[in-house]
Image: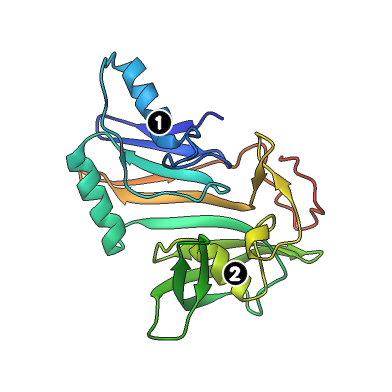
């Protein structure tokens, strides 16, 4: 799996993460965006030793789309602060089972993560962490719906849990109730969730940077009539 470079300068790197690739390495030793970026920068800039890679946010392994990394610690701190204070705009596409009662609206939940099982659940008001997302129906037919999702918080598994809680699991997300299976390009399971767009302030120039990530070949066809094929368009 090879990420697609969407934007690069002396401070930032924006990649289109393939579904199935880790954002950051773990105990499995599988390749990740961080290790790929380190190798890429070592080769490009002829760096003999370690290079700094600042991962300021991440996507779940079965999710595809836009991820922002920093080349310096100063840039990483400034970008991380934007994510922390809500200064970054995020747009996701999702194909879900079912359909919302309304064509657009907002959902607010309280979420809590069980680190032993790596699962997230909703809790009562006043417990857990607040999760907010605005949704819009883009298309719907044959029991499936394509949604645009704009989260204003960045909780672990947030969109997956908020959708599943409302009886609309993301297609392919068997962890949270989907009955369908979708394969990534490497043959491993993926889910029909794609980080489509990211807008942030450049850490040194102060300009707004808007990046759009195209869907990849393993993205289920956007037509809600899709019935289980993993062929992308």
Q: Tell me how far mark 1 sits from mark 2, CA to CA.
A: 31 Å
Whole-percent x and y of residue 106?
A: 50, 76
Residue linked to disc 2? 163
* Residue 24 horizontal side relative to residue 18, left or right: left
Does residue 4 lie above or below 215 as drawn?
above
Q: Is residue 204 visible?
A: no
Residue 190 lies, in percent from the top left, at 64, 47
Compare residues 141 and 1 and report the one nearer the observer.
1
Numbered tag placed on residue 57 in the rendering: none
State the residue position of label 1.
35
Q: Is residue 132 left or right of residue 174?
A: left
Foreground: 161 or 16? 161
Q: Residue at x 24, y 44 (%)?
A: 76
Image spot of residue 110 (x, y percent): 44, 77
Q: Quadrant of residue 94?
A: bottom right
Question: What's the residue at 29%, 17% (across, down)?
Answer: 45
Of residue 104 and residue 144, the one placed in the foreground of this image is 144
Q: Residues within 10 Å of mark 1 (few under 14, many from 20)?
A: some
Q: Give the residue drawn at x 63%, y 52%.
A: 191
Indicate the colouring scheme: rainbow
Sooner in the amino-acid sequence: mark 1 or mark 2: 1
Residue 26 quadrant = top left
Mark 2: which secondary structure? helix
């Amino acid at each position: 799996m090879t990420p697609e470079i969407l934007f690069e300068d002396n401070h930032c790197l924006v990649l289109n993460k393939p579904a199935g690739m880790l954002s950051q390495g773990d105990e499995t030793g599988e390749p990740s965006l961080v290790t790929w970026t380190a190798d890429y920068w070592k080769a490009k800039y002829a760096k003999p030793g370690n290079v700094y890679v600042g991962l300021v946010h991440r996507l779940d392994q079965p999710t595809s789309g836009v991820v922002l990394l920093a080349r310096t610690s100063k840039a990483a701190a400034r970008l991380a602060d934007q994510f922390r204070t809500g200064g970054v705009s995020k747009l996701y596409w999702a194909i879900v089972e079912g359909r919302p009662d309304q064509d657009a609206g907002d959902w607010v939940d309280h979420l809590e993560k069980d680190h032993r099982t790596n699962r997230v659940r909703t809790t009562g008001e006043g417990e857990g962490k607040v999760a907010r997302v605005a949704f819009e129906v883009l298309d719907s037919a044959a029991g499936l719906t394509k949604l645009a999702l704009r989260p204003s918080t960045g909780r672990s598994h947030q969109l997956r849990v908020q959708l599943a809680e409302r009886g609309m699991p993301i297609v392919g997300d068997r962890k949270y109730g989907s009955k369908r299976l979708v394969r990534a390009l490497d043959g491993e399971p993926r889910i029909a969730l794609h980080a489509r767009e990211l807008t942030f302030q450049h850490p040194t120039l102060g300009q707004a940077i808007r990046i759009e990530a195209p869907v990849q070949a393993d993205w289920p066809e956007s037509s809600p009539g899709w019935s289980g094929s993993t062929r992308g368009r």
